[in-house]
């Protein structure tokens, strides 16, 4: 059991650290460090991903010094299933995590709440592998599941063997929840909610988290480290200092167009993530939600910039692999949907940038398909660590060395809809989705000709062979993995 001590006393607001028993100072200096940056509920509404309005200068700068994956996908568009998957390097049917924990649970004791250790107790997580190899391994903020914002300031549903140090920031956004606009009184998480906040970046939870991450970089700069910085934004509530809202005037925000299927909501499971309160939103409220989400992205991006600037200032850039990603995609009213838990492209698609020192891509973009489950073998490979042989992903290092290469021909994403599952396969050309093994519908979209997924081709005889092939691949995946 880790010895718990209070650290970072200089931060006034809710920072707690835990230090485990085995310091790692003896490891040789020539190892590559890892700075793992992850935002919560961040889709690809970023300038470097081609968005015309959203400003993301710091993530853009990371893309300019690394490789931007144009086609990276989560394995499950929900916090705990996705994070359990990529942090263990195993797909959701292996971790058995298909839902979030019960709301409101404060947990370092995960008995009775779905946690991958119940099903794969001896698994070695990605950060745990680095611990076993002599790295100082620290978490700031949200890496495993947290109920946001309810569990901000706690360790959430953590995994104790993964970390040597933990920091749980809690800022003004948490302390002043009563100021937040919400569709569901006294609820700020699952519902759409937002606030143009008073005060500075540094008072917000992610501002405090970035400050803590900078302190950890300063403290551990002389030894191999794996620093995981999990931002809470742009997850609801969309809270950011008011100046960020001013960058996105609502009269400049255009709403997505809905297709005929979107209007009819067919097949039904494809749209079942919609919540009742979202059905009666006015167009003005839709624009306000988009403004607030984008403001939260740009605020979070600024905190990314602070951490990366510190890495550069400390002379660590040439010895550190930087990853920037998100746990899943997110809808901003495309298909008439909000948030996550659909199998449309916006929900499955994640930003992924890897900036690796040495002979790796810089400032390039790759069309190679990537899955979040590939992060574990990729980081182990880049850092020369021996990964467990059971991992479900593959190393993306060949793509980092040559962005024209690819390591897989498909990416898989799944959801659970009460009593049945939906699976989606994305290839370079197609997205095919199978609901309840076909009993509740199927969808086929030509992502090259129809990237907005407006025309479901699944019942078109001209595409029967494609449907049969992709359906077989999903059935194989559902039963035994790839
Ligand atoms: Ca999330």
Image: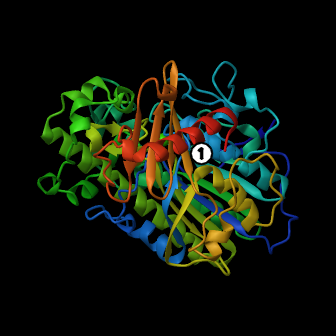
Find numbered disc 1 in the image and state the secondary structure of the residue it sits on.
Answer: loop
Q: Residue at x 58, y 36 (%)?
A: 81
Is residue 328 at all visible to an observer of this figure? no
Considering only vertical position in the picture, is 393 above or below 358? above
Q: How is the image coloured?
A: rainbow
Residue 432 pos. (x, y %): 45, 43
Residue 5 pos. (x, y %): 72, 42
Neighbor class of circle 1 (other Cα within 10 Å; few <14, some 14-19, many 20+) is many
Q: Which residue is label 1 attached to?
A: 143
Considering only vertical position in the picture, is 160 above or below 24? above
Q: Quadrant of the C terminus?
A: top right
User: Does residue 90 appear to the left or right of 439 in the view shown?
Assistant: right
Total labels: the figure holds: 1
Residue 438 pos. (x, y %): 47, 28
Q: Residue furthest left?
A: 251
Residue 185 location, quadrant? top left
Mark 1 CB within 8 Å of ligand 1: no
Considering only vertical position in the picture, is 393 above or below 319? above
**Nearest the eye: 418 or 232:** 418
Q: Residue furthest right?
A: 26
**Nearest the eye: 447 or 237:** 447
Q: Residue at x 45, y 60 (%)?
A: 303
Residue 215 location, quadrant? bottom right
**Nearest the eye: 415 or 184:** 415
Q: Quadrant of the N terminus?
A: top right
Residue 397 location, quadrant? bottom right
Is residue 215 at all visible to an observer of this figure? yes
């Amino acid at each position: 059991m880790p010895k718990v001590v209070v650290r970072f006393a200089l931060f006034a607001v809710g920072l707690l650290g835990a230090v485990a028993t085995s310091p790692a100072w003896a490891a040789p200096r020539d190892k590559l460090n890892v700075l793992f940056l992850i935002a919560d509920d961040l889709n690809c509404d970023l300038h470097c991903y081609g968005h015309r309005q959203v400003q993301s200068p710091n993530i853009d700068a990371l893309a300019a010094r690394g490789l931007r994956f144009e086609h990276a996908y989560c394995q499950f568009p929900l916090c705990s299933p996705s994070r359990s998957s990529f942090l263990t390097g195993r797909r959701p049917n292996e971790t058995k995590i298909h839902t979030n924990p019960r709301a409101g649970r404060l947990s370092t004791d995960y008995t009775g709440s779905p946690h991958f250790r119940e099903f794969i107790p001896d698994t070695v997580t990605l950060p745990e592998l680095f611990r076993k190899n002599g790295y100082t391994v620290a978490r700031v903020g949200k890496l495993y599941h947290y109920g946001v914002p309810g569990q901000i300031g706690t360790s959430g549903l953590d995994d104790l063997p993964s970390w040597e140090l933990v920091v749980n920031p809690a800022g003004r956004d948490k302390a002043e929840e009563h100021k937040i606009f919400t569709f569901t009184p006294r609820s700020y998480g699952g519902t759409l909610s937002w606030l143009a906040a008073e005060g500075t970046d540094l008072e917000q939870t992610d501002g405090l988290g970035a400050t803590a991450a900078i302190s950890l970089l300063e403290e551990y700069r002389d030894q191999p480290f794996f620093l995981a910085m999990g931002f809470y934004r742009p997850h609801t509530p969309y809270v950011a200092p008011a100046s960020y809202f001013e960058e996105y005037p609502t009269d400049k925000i255009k709403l997505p167009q809905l297709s005929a299927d979107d209007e009819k909501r067919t097949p039904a499971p494809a749209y079942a993530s919609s919540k009742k309160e979202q059905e009666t939103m006015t167009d003005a409220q839709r624009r306000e939600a988009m403004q607030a989400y984008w403001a939260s992205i740009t605020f979070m991006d600024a905190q990314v910039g602070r951490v990366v600037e510190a890495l550069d200032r400390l002379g660590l850039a040439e010895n550190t692999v930087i990853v920037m990603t998100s746990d899943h995609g997110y809808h901003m009213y495309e298909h008439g949907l909000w948030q996550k838990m659909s199998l449309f492209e916006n929900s499955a698609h994640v930003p992924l940038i890897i900036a690796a020192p040495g002979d790796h891509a810089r400032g390039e973009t790759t069309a190679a398909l990537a899955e979040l489950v590939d992060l574990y073998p990729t980081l182990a490979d880049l850092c020369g660590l021996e990964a467990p042989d059971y991992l479900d992903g593959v190393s993306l290092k060949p793509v980092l060395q040559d962005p024209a290469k690819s390591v897989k021909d498909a990416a898989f994403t799944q959801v659970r809809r009460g009593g049945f599952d939906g699976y989606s396969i994305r290839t370079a050309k197609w997205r095919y989705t199978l609901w309840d093994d076909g009993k509740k519908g199927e969808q086929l979209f030509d992502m090259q000709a129809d990237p907005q997924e407006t025309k479901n081709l699944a019942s078109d005889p001209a595409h029967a062979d494609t449907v049969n092939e992709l359906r077989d691949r999903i059935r194989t995946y559902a039963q035994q993995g790839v």
